[in-house]
Image: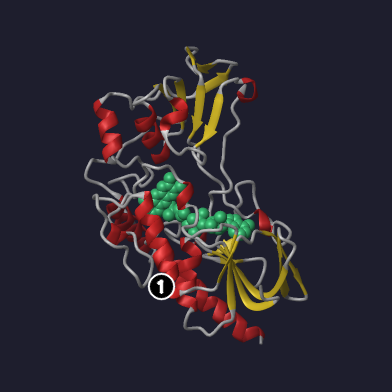
Amino acid sequence: MKKEVELIVIGGGQSALACGYFLRRTGLDYLILDDKETCGGSWPQTWESLTLFSPAKFSSLPGFMMPASVGEYPSREEVISYLCAYERRYDFPIERGVRVTQVTREDGVFIIHTEEGQQVKTKAVISATGTWQNPFIPEVSGRERFQGLQMHSKEYQNSKAFEGKRVLIVGEGNTGAQLLAEVSKVAQTVWATHKQPEFLPDDVDGRVLFDLATAKYEAEKLGKPFDSSRYHLGNIVMTPSVKEARGRAVLSSKGRISVLEETAVVWENGERDEIDAILWCTGFGFATGHLSDLVSVDVRGRISTEETRCKDVPGLWTVGYGGWTGFASATLIGVGRSARQTVKEVVDYIKEIK
Ligand code: FAD
């Protein structure tokens, strides 16, 4: 690996690839460092039956369309092959199996420290490490006493581990609903949610949500009012599996957990259900621990930014983590915009410090 480059991109998932796309014509000497041995970012770790919310042509990175999928929505495998094809097509300079442990800065130069003991010096850094390596489980009284299986959705591949069990599914988001739909086919399930889950109309998919989010974003940018009462962007998308689960009447929540016991969940209304396992579908923070020596990182992994540019450290950008770092940036279709703007800013910055 080179010891000095102009720019390091940390992470090799879709966000890093989108940056790579815009970096091709800049002439910058850069490297992408990814801790995985294979392509696809975190997608290979998602569950086997996962499909996207939007059709392929609305789930593409810049420059190269995702090929049409076999089903209505692309499967996990189709997303992985697309990302691998994208990487091959543009032949990005990626070093794999390199885990960045910390980034430090001395006299305006960043030093990238890796688990393998290498160090690389660079003028600028784009962090694009996603969320997957920072799973979140909320504080729930008695959790440490519970004796059965506990799994975060990060580990979930299929329903095998839950077969024949009494399973508590926690979380009212899309992951909670989709995994409830799948696990309830082989297990007896109860669903815990912080608030009552709300479902989108059957014909609203990720594409409609993206268009709506875009309209809201554009209106806010212009200081215009926006009527967001039509759909709540965070509500559950009625994927085919969730629709099927609705037909089996398994989509009802028992509300909030009061306490967990060795073999049971006690609900806020005092009712109690014996359970053998818990599946936490409670989301993720941001995998930014490697920036903690450089900048203040909050408990969820967020740092202070203006769009993708770090406010406190010149030369540092964060791409693909979600709304706080660029509109819709944690989606395949949305990250291109953040990547393009970021690369433009990086090029200007490097010219300026020369
Ligand atoms: P990742 O894919 O996580 O890539 C980051 C890469 O960085 C990984 O390879 C990781 O191993 C590596 N890395 C992390 N830390 C380090 C380090 N310190 N050093 C070196 N390498 C590191 N989006 C859509 O557009 N449509 C959908 O339908 C959709 N559905 C989703 C369903 C689920 C269940 C989830 C979780 C997400 C979904 N998303 C969807 C969101 C989004 O597309 C993904 O979260 C996406 O993986 C984010 O890409 P990324 O490149 O930012 O991060």
Q: Is residue 197 left or right of residue 37?
A: left
The residue depicted at 73 percent of the width and 76 percent of the height is: 108
Question: Residue farthest to the front?
Answer: 37
Residue 177 placement (x, y as % from top left): 37, 34
Residue 340 placement (x, y as % from top left): 45, 73
**Image vertical order of residue 117 relative to residue 134, above or below:** below
Closer-to-camera residue (48/151): 48
Q: Quadrant of residue 217?
A: bottom left
Residue 252 placement (x, y as % from top left): 35, 25
Closer-to-camera residue (283/195): 283
Question: Residue farthest to the left?
Answer: 203
* Figure quadrant of the N terminus: bottom right
The residue depicted at 53 percent of the width and 85 percent of the height is: 27
Q: Quadrant of residue 148?
A: top right
Label 1, on which residue? Answer: 89
**Image vertical order of residue 258 relative to residue 5, above or below:** above
The residue depicted at 61 percent of the width and 25 percent of the height is: 143
Question: Residue farthest to the right?
Answer: 107
Amino acid found under the numbered disc labelled 1: Arg
**Image vertical order of residue 277 relative to residue 338, above or below:** above
The residue depicted at 29 percent of the width and 62 percent of the height is: 67
Colour mode? secondary structure
